[in-house]
Image (cartoon, rainbow, N blue to C red):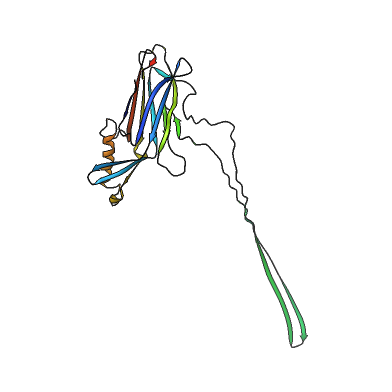
Amino acid sequence: MANDRNSLPELIEVITRISNSNEPENREIRVELRVNSVTLVADDSLEFVVQLERANLAIDLDGFEVVPKSRHGEPTKPNDVSVEREMRNEKTQKGEISGNAELTLAQNPSGSLGLKAAGSVASTHTESHNSKETYSFLRVKARGNLTWEVSEPGDTRKVLDDTYLNDDVLCKIKALPGANMLAVRLDAFARKRDIRITPLSKLSKFTFKSTNHEKMFNALVAKSLAQSKANGGILTFSVSEITVEDDKPHR
């Protein structure tokens, strides 16, 4: 049966199960994934909010292989793409037209009446070109080595906050011929750089460059799954393990 271990379910919760597929030889790995903000307390005087800007899922298979073209959120780019363009032409040209005229009329031998005119005209024409492309964004995106990346769209990094998988098929699998053991493991983790730690307002005097930031992070690490410290900058928050016997999933 499935063994779901969520060390910090208020922040990230993963529930995994294996179900029968429409194809008799295939199975489906179905996943529920929920991500929220969580408030943690390191000690009596240090309270902070933890949020994830990006999360990752990773599957490890024993005795199974992934069915081709079955991965959820596969970012396959079509060969024929529709592009929307916004064009504005601006071209700058500068020129100057100038001239003068002079007229002298003799009134008498001792004097003269003069008329002089001068002028110039400048013209400017500006041309520019802009283009805009419309594209789709996958919040749960398949990556290499049986991993998935969870993120939000936008130029600035937004925090994760919602249900991203609701018993969706992450991928389909089938047993390898002659496999002695059939098992599936799914890890949910985040990298240090994708974890946002914010002290509450009463602790705004602390900065992340001080030892208080390290205390915050250590408190979070202590709540991560079976780890006392970060492993290579990665914190694992959830592990699901399923063992399949007699080529039939046990729930």
Q: Quadrant of the C terminus?
A: top left
Q: Residue furthest top?
A: 178
Q: Is residue 191 left or right of residue 129?
A: left
| Residue 175 rendering spot, x and y as whole percentages | 42, 15
Q: Is residue 118 above or below residue 202?
A: below
Q: Quadrant of residue 214?
A: top left
Q: Please report the residue visible at 28 percent of the width from the left and 36 percent of the height from the top.
A: 221
User: In the rendered image, which quarter is residue 57 located in?
Assistant: top left
Q: x%, y% of residue 188?
A: 36, 31
* Above or below for 119 versus 186: below
| Total numbered badges shown on the rendered structure | 0
Question: Is residue 26 rendered to the left or right of residue 233?
Answer: right
- The structure residue drawn at horizontal position 40% and vertical position 27%, both measured from the top left corner, is 31
Q: Nearer the viewer, residue 121 or 160?
A: 160
Q: Is residue 98 above or below residue 65?
A: below
Q: Give x and y (percent) for residue 36.
A: 37, 38
What residue lies at 25% left-to-right and 42% top-to-bottom?
42
Q: Position of residue 146 (x, y in %)?
A: 42, 26
- Check the picture and name the quadrant holding the N terminus: top left
Which image quarter: residue 245? top left
Q: Looking at the image, which is closer to me, 34 or 106? A: 34
